Amino acid sequence: MKRLDTSITNALLVVCCCLPLSACSGIQSVFNPHGPNARHTAQIGWVMFIGGALIFLVVAAFAVYAVLRKPAKRGWISHRGFIIGGGIVFPLITLTALLIYDFRAARAIVAGLASPALTIEVVGEQWWWRVRYLGGSDVDESVVVDADAADKGIVISANEIHIPAGRSVTFALKSADVIHSFWVPNLAGKLDMIPGRTTKLRMQADHAGVFRGQCAEYCGGPHAKMAFYVVAHEPEEFERWLAHERTPAQPPGTRFLAEGQRLFLETSCAVCHQIRGTAARGQVGPDLTHVGNRLSIGAGILPNNTGTLAGWIASSQHLKPGNRMPSFDAFTGEELRALAAYLESLK
Ligand SMILES: [Cu+2]
């Protein structure tokens, strides 16, 4: 029985130690930085963690010494000089040093990135992300929903952010409702999105790749299902992507897809969603002009294919309870397939 107990304890220890470590790699991890901004943040984290752990061990050693050592021998530990030195002077010096180190690292984060040519505006909405590529132009601080954005040369998208690798990008962060927090752990620290304000975050990805972000401030019901992907491309590839994203939607190429489009325009979908190049101009939900190209739907929660699209339309309230799109469970299977195929064809 005793042997069994220890082996269970050992197994538990292994699990407890390995679980956190398994989070150290991957596309959504602060331990796996892929940009200068995130590298500084990770370094600050390690310095604080290792420094704190060392100091903790020293303090714990003194505590053990004080308890176990014979009273006659441990007297020096309560001398006034030792208490003032260890309790006031030492913390003062270490905390001041850490503060200076922290300020310098924060300065390096801002100074290290060239002034960006590209500004991407991201508006946090309950519970998805409105994304607009502004080019070099300034952000209009007051505008959150802009039905005419496309006419002003702004590229509109949602729930997925594309950036050029090796170039620094400014994110202009806003909120349409409550406080959200924009966080791409591999690329930068998190920053709040505050209603009525624009906060700015500069970041850069070292190389092409896909990273995952997550809303990091509780914003109501499906907050945990408010994620997104960041796709970093080689710069020329990014320009091609942006030029394509700017174009209106492709017209349906077959009768089946045309039926899907008819259903989209004639049911209430068009009231909430925009598909540029069609009569659908709704601004309540994500822009769907090129939804077929996105990696995920539902703000990062499901892979994007005709199956998940049909599932989302029929039961979005089951897949993401509380979100602002009703489930449309009155469509026949054939209608659902046509709608989903049409959306998937919007490349
Ligand atoms: Cu949230």
Image (cartoon, helix red, strand yellow):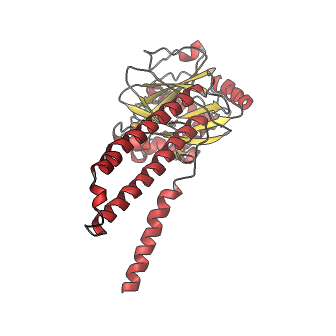
What is the x, y in percent for residue 171?
53, 26
Report which quarter residue 88 is drawn in.
top left
Report which quarter residue 34 is drawn in.
top right
Q: Which residue is more in the foreground, 264 or 27?
A: 27
The answer to whether residue 327 is visible is no
**Which residue is painted at 38% across and 80% down in the image?**
5
Q: Which residue is more in the foreground, 338 or 270?
A: 270
Q: How many marks?
A: 0
Residue 109, above or below 281:
below
Q: Quadrant of the N terminus?
A: bottom left
Q: Quadrant of the C terminus?
A: top right
Q: Which residue is more in the foreground, 290 or 108?
A: 108
Residue 82, above or below 190:
below
**Which residue is painted at 28% across and 53% down in the image?**
79
The answer to whether residue 131 is visible is yes
What is the x, y in percent for residue 72?
26, 67
What is the x, y in percent for residue 305?
59, 45
What is the x, y in percent for residue 28?
53, 46
Report which quarter residue 249 is drawn in.
top right
Is 177 left, or right, of 208 in this rendering?
left
